[in-house]
């Protein structure tokens, strides 16, 4: 067997850091944007671009589906398969998530500093959904967990629900069979969104539903299975170029069909989510292949693999968790106090967004150093079974 045909993606893939950094950037700017109601073409385009930042969540899901499924496939014959996966997942996700909930729902009330925007979710019967990673179901329906500082936790809930069962699915699937399962999940997600729309479900509830978003996770998982299957593409410039053109074609087709990827429309919530996820999956696959093909690493790859983006990717989880509390609980009150408005002009709005972004990055850095890092050191490497390629997975 030739070296090319024996190729498999493994280890650190630098361009994926760029994708993760891009995802967290567009989501954060979307969530903290104060740009609205302006006149002029440039301002309208800026507002429109910020509105489409929701697409970054789809990119997050695709990346997560790929990375987690790759680990699961490479370790599925390990005797510690389940224990290793769930323990590593808990040590990565739980410390910051629950520390944030403890601060907001236990410490602040104890100190008599309950923010008014959290009062609605203070009863335990409402905040329990956040502690149980179920707020994506209850928040949009007004049942709890939908307060502005924590509403964005819905996406973390989607991931945790998906990965509660996904290791069991992967355990009994070869990469080829898993690709078929992923295709079935994508189809099921499309059908679920169609059913939601036909039943008149609230658009936000559709937006945050695990059933609505599992196609993005499955498409990321499909890329991982494809790259580890006997039919995996060979790492060459031709295949990288084809994948890039595929991503471009999907993006263009989705733009036309959905009329620009608005968030809450019938076309977007029926098929638009899948267009975005498929585009991200094709781009992800191109990045994975290009990592082993130096002559295919054009400016697009060099930009994504830029060392400057790696710290943003490294702290992206904390940036995502903390940006909304910082924005809602500190940023907006200070804006109101200092400038007398929460709806400033475009210049002040952009300056505000820049400051909150930098502060969120700093908070992410601090969280990683003081909280996440020590817990990550407790994780044991995900070890493959004897005889499998890739002895460990970080």
Image (cartoon, rainbow, N blue to C red):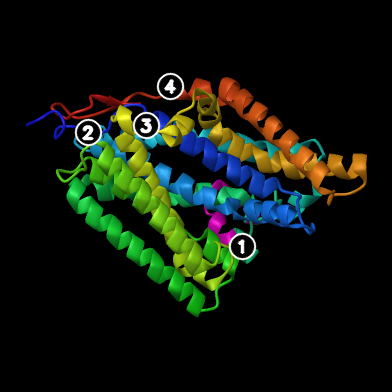
Q: In the rendering, at what x and y percent does residue 220 appear?
A: 36, 47
Q: CA distance from mark 1 to mark 2?
A: 42 Å
User: Mark 3 or mark 2: which comes first in sequence?
Assistant: 2
Identify the element where label 2 is drawn: loop
Q: Which residue is mark 1?
A: 140
Look at the image and tell me in which quarter the N terminus lies. Answer: top left
Q: Which residue is mark 2?
A: 8
Residue 129: in magenta span: yes
Please name which of the two marks, 4 or 1, marks the residue nearer to the observer: 1
Magenta-colored span = 126-138
Residue at the (59%, 66%) spot, across then down:
264
Q: CA distance from mark 3 to mark 4?
A: 36 Å
Q: Which residue is mark 4?
A: 378
Residue 136 placement, left or right of 347? left
Q: Quadrant of residue 234?
A: top left
Residue at the (24%, 36%) spot, across then down:
236
Identify the element where label 3 is drawn: loop
Q: CA distance from mark 3 to mark 2?
A: 18 Å
Identify the element where label 1 is drawn: helix
Please name which of the two marks, 4 or 2, marks the residue nearer to the observer: 2
Q: In the rendering, at what x and y percent does residue 32 appear?
A: 70, 46
Q: CA distance from mark 4 to mark 2?
A: 28 Å
Q: In the rendering, at what x and y percent does residue 230 appear?
A: 14, 43
């Amino acid at each position: 067997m030739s070296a090319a045909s024996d190729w498999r993606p493994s280890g650190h893939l630098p361009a994926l850091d760029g994708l993760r950094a891009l995802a967290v950037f567009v989501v954060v700017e979307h969530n903290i944007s104060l740009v609205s109601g302006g006149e002029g073409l440039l301002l309208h385009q800026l507002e429109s671009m910020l509105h489409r930042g929701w697409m970054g969540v789809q990119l997050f899901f695709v990346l997560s589906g790929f990375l987690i499924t790759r680990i699961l496939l490479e370790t599925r014959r390990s005797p510690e398969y389940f224990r290793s996966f769930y323990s590593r997942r808990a040590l990565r996700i739980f410390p910051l998530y629950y520390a944030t909930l403890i601060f907001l729902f236990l410490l602040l009330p104890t100190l008599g500093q309950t923010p008014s925007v959290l009062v609605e979710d203070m009863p335990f019967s409402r905040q329990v959904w956040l502690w149980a990673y179920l707020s994506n179901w209850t928040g949009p329906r007004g049942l709890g967990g939908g307060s502005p500082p924590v509403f964005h936790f819905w996406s973390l809930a989607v991931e945790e629900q998906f990965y509660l069962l996904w290791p069991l699915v992967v355990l009994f699937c070869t990469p080829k069979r898993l690709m078929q399962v992923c295709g079935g999940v994508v189809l099921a997600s499309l059908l679920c969104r169609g059913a939601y729309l036909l039943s008149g479900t609230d658009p936000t509830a559709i937006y945050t539903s695990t059933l609505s978003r599992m196609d993005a996770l499955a498409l990321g998982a499909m890329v991982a299975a494809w790259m580890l299957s006997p039919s995996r593409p060979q790492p060459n410039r031709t295949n990288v170029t084809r994948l890039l053109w595929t991503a471009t074609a999907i993006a263009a087709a989705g733009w036309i069909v959905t009329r620009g990827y608005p968030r809450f429309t019938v076309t977007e919530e029926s098929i638009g989510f899948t267009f975005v996820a498929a585009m991200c999956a094709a781009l992800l696959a191109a990045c994975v292949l290009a990592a082993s093909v130096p002559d295919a690493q054009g400016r697009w790859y060099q930009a994504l693999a830029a060392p400057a983006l790696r710290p943003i990717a490294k702290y992206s989880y904390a940036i995502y968790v903390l940006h909304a509390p910082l924005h809602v609980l500190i940023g907006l009150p200070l804006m109101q106090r200092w400038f007398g408005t929460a709806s400033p002009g475009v210049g002040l709005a952009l300056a505000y967004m820049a400051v909150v972004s930098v502060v969120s990055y700093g908070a992410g850095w601090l969280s990683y150093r003081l909280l996440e890092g020590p817990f990550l050191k407790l994780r044991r490497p995900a070890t493959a079974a004897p005889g499998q390629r890739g002895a460990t997975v970080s």
